[in-house]
Amino acid sequence: MKEKKLDLNSIIGFVLIFGILLWIMYQNKPDEKAIAAEKAQKELVIKEAKAKELSDKAVATATVAVAATGDSTQLAQLQKSLGNFAYSATLPSAKAAYTTIENEFVKLKIANKGGYIVEATLKNFEKFKKGSGQLVELIKDNNADLNVQLLTSDNRTLNTKDLYFEPTLTKVGADQILSMKLKAGPNEFLEYKYILKPNDFMVGFDIRSQGLNKVLNTAKPLDLEWNLKTFRTEKSIAYEDRYTLLNYEYGDEKFNNVGDGKDKEETPENVKFIAFKQHFFSTILLTDTPFAKSTLKSNKLVVDEKVDTTFIKQFNAKVPLAFTNGEIDHKMSWYFGPSDYKTLKAYDKNLEKIIPLGWGIFGWINKFVFIPLFGFLSSYIAYGIAIIIFTIIIKIAMSPITYKSFLSQAKMKVLRPEITELGEKFKKDPMKKQQETMKLYNKAGVNPMAGCIPALIQLPFMYASFQFFPSAFELRQKSFLWADDLSSFDQVVKLPFHVPMYGDHISLFPILAAIAIFFYMKMTSGDQQMAAPQQEGMPDMAKMMKYMIYISPIMMLIFFNSYGAGLSLYNFISNLITIGIMFVIKNYIVDSDRIHAQIQQNKLKEPKKQGKFQQKLQEVMEQAEAQKAKDKKK
């Protein structure tokens, strides 16, 4: 009977919960009027967009027709839509034509319609893998556009991307200068000027107007809008997505990014450059005169890696172009090139900030240690060997710290029996036990924090490596052993299925790194457990370390499987060298008997003066003990 009652109660409970859920769903049901209004709004937006598209097509068709026939009736009709800018329809340039400028590094194709770059190709870099034959194309197939919205004095709103510019290509020395003019008359125009120098990723870009002070409404700035949908260029979609961001510099050399995810937006002021940064390539707009206020948007396009394989992010920038004495005159530049620290730094415009090297001490380690050292090594030897030698140098430099950490563990291990004895003696008085333990440390000349500090010193270097290797452009498409690209995962087996969090392939370097970290933790965990007895009220560190021996390698396997092979190789060699250093220290340098004898001698000496931290800790303990005694009297 009892069991049946329990079952009945369960059924009643489920019915009540189900009823509550239905009530909540009913309460949150959208109002039918709201649904209808929303539907009507969506239909209106779609209708307006289609009407605009048809209008733009009509304008373009009419423009071409006027240019071909010179029909004055059609021109009069066109003036109703374009006003003074109908003059551009009378020019031979009012047709779908292009001008190409190129140097040793980049090839740019600029369209008459809109006057902007419709193709930007990097001539010395290939997509996906070396030998693919596909050059990196930052702009192609309408993935980008540039538009200036013109507000005319007769209340028209025109978009430059729909109008035709007149091109003029000249040379000044070795520099190529392409002038694109949107004309409102023989001497009245809006000009885009492109300046391309030899052996340069930077393209000068000036926007100026002449004689338009009466044609345009100069009461407020013009809006320049720049859109780019970034193509995938690397093997790993997830990896490229992680490092593709919209970055910008603003104010007094401040730097930020819009953030990662769906429909992110920022509105910074006094913007000096806007960088549409992909993992290893960037398109950057720089301005000599900071933009007063910008609207910057970023939208993640990769939802399903199996389907979303062409584009990574959608970037949008909207900036104001202020008038000066009724005219526009803005000097800017475009950068189309690699996201390479040295290349960007050479321009001396803070562009290297877009490389994510880490903040504070992590960034300093990368800038002043990792980048110079690895740059020097890789200039003389193969990149895979350079990583190994680089790792050896870093680990040897850190070996004194490793030695101090292990020495501290050895001292604590010698004191463990006495600490355990104190624990038993003051089992019922934890505060007294802590005080006596601190006295023992002081008398024996042992600092319990000495083992933690060296480990903390090593942490920044470890974190810096996690920033350095994924950002090292030098590793892109450089092979080593079975890895054909050290900047991407070193796939040795392609799986016929996808494992959640792991991926659809097996990388070998992460497996080697996981094995190395397993043996390293196995080797050190015993000493750590013996050195540090469990404190009352504290977690069982011995048990935690036992679990971490197995958890850490598994985490290494999961998270590093899709990371760059260079980082996995570094971690594998780093753990391997640490095992070797620990073996030498443990067996040939640190002598437990000698340490024990030294501690016994220290006990006979006058106790060392406590450090500030130990003094403060002792004071806190004494105050707590006094308060405890006072509470007992009450």
Image: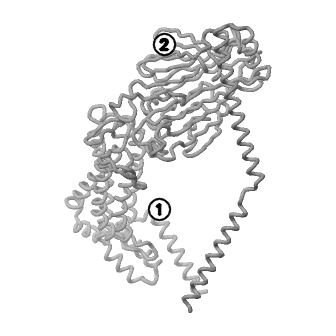
Q: Is residue 437 left or right of residue 163?
A: left
Q: Nearer the viewer, mark 1 or mark 2?
A: 2
Q: What distance separates the C-alpha of mark 1 from that of mark 2?
A: 66 Å
Where's the C terminus, which quadrant?
A: bottom right
- The residue sitting at the right extreme is 154
Closer to the chain start, of discs 1 and 2, is: 2
Q: Is residue 183 left or right of residue 461?
A: right
Q: Is residue 303 left or right of residue 158?
A: left
**Foreground residue among 107 and 432:** 107
The residue under label 1 is which amino acid type? Answer: Lys
Q: Residue at x 46, y 17 (%)?
A: 102
Per the image, the residue denoted by label 1 is: 612
Q: Residue at x 51, y 21 (%)?
A: 203
Snapshot quadrant of residue 32: bottom right
The image shows residue 467 at horizontal and vertical percentages of: 42, 44
Per the image, the residue denoted by label 2 is: 175
Viewer can see residue 52: yes
**Foreground residue among 352 and 533:** 352
SS label for mark 1: helix
SS label for mark 2: strand
**Foreground residue among 217 and 206:** 217
Snapshot quadrant of residue 123: top left
The image shows residue 349 at horizontal and vertical percentages of: 52, 29
Q: Residues within 10 Å of mark 2 (few under 14, many from 20)?
A: few
Q: Residue at x 73, y 8 (%)?
A: 72
The relative height of residue 535 versus residue 455 in the rendered view (above or below) is below
**Foreground residue among 139 and 188:** 139
The image shows residue 605 at horizontal and vertical percentages of: 32, 69
Colour scheme in the image? Answer: one colour
The residue under label 2 is which amino acid type? Answer: Asp
Where's the N terminus, which quadrant?
A: bottom right
